[in-house]
């Protein structure tokens, strides 16, 4: 009988990310439920959002005020591991495991991490520039959308090899954008979609560059021009 752990099938980077996110959520949820931390633990999530979320005001501190303190510099990354609820975290973990398996099998750990964190960071910066509200950004979703961008690129290549309509590669992002629109109509919109869409575009652009041999092919095209 094969007793191999199912976790062995998940590449190491997405697995590590999910474990960190799940660990953070476990502590916050346990505090909200009163299992740890006493009465003050109910406010742990709100305090964490205050301390680790990214917002347009953070970008103003970094670029305009010149505040290069650790508190400001960590926020383009720290927001990734903090979510608004158990369900918010659960969906992030499920999507990250699914996309992490698919994309992680095609990209080595270094390029995969660059895809995820590059999309999350640039998505946050775009949010800071274009968000109409100074609302804190939290969650791994801009990075996950970056992986969707990489998935789209991979599907584009696959459909091209099969001689099929390559624009079908954008079906997944189209469905997600449609669901996001319906959700915003029913429950109200947040400007987080700016970070998520920017993360998708970042992943789509980075995917061919960090693919095996991708940077060399890019430099060769530049020299030919």
Image: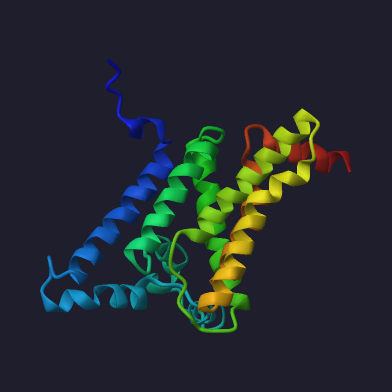
Residue 191 seen from this side:
no
Colouring used for the render: rainbow
Residue 3 seen from this side:
yes
Image vertical order of residue 20 relative to residue 35, above or below: above
- The image quarter containing residue 81 is bottom left
Q: Position of residue 48 (x, y in %)?
A: 31, 73
- The image quarter containing residue 196 is bottom right
Q: Is residue 6 left or right of residue 98?
A: left
Q: Is residue 49 left or right of residue 208?
A: left
Q: Position of residue 19 (x, y in %)?
A: 32, 48
Q: Residue at x 24, y 74 (%)?
A: 44
Residue furthest to the right:
225
Q: Is residue 8 left or right of residue 103?
A: left
Q: Residue at x 53, y 79 (%)?
A: 188
Q: Position of residue 202 (x, y in %)?
A: 63, 56
Q: Position of residue 1 (x, y in %)?
A: 27, 15
Q: Nearer the viewer, residue 186 or 127?
A: 186
Q: Residue at x 30, y 18 (%)?
A: 2
Quadrant containing the C terminus in the rendered view? top right
Count of numbered circles on the image: 0
Q: Nearer the viewer, residue 79 or 178?
A: 178
Q: Residue at x 38, y 49 (%)?
A: 17
- The image quarter containing residue 64 is bottom right
Q: Nearer the viewer, residue 62 or 124?
A: 124
């Amino acid at each position: 009988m094969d007793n191999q752990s199912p976790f062995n099938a998940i590449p190491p980077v997405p697995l590590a990310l999910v474990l960190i996110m799940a660990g953070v959520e476990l502590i916050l949820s346990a505090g909200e439920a009163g299992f740890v931390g006493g009465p003050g633990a109910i406010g742990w999530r709100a305090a964490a959002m205050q301390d680790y979320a990214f917002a347009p005001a953070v970008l103003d501190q970094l670029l305009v005020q010149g505040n290069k303190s650790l508190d400001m510099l960590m926020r383009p990354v720290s927001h990734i591991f903090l979510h608004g609820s158990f369900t918010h975290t659960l969906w992030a973990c499920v999507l990250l495991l699914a996309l992490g398996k698919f994309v992680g099998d095609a990209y080595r750990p270094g390029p995969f991490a660059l895809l995820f964190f590059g999309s999350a960071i640039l998505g946050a910066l775009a949010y800071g520039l274009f968000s109409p509200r100074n609302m804190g950004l939290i969650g791994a979703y801009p990075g996950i959308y970056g992986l969707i961008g990489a998935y789209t690129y991979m599907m584009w290549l696959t459909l091209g090899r099969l001689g099929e309509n390559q624009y079908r590669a954008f079906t997944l992002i189209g469905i997600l954008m449609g669901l996001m629109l319906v959700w915003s109509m029913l429950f109200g919109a947040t400007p987080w979609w700016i970070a998520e869409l920017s993360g998708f575009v970042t992943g789509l652009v980075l995917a061919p560059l960090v693919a095996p041999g991708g940077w060399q092919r890019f430099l060769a095209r530049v020299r030919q021009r």
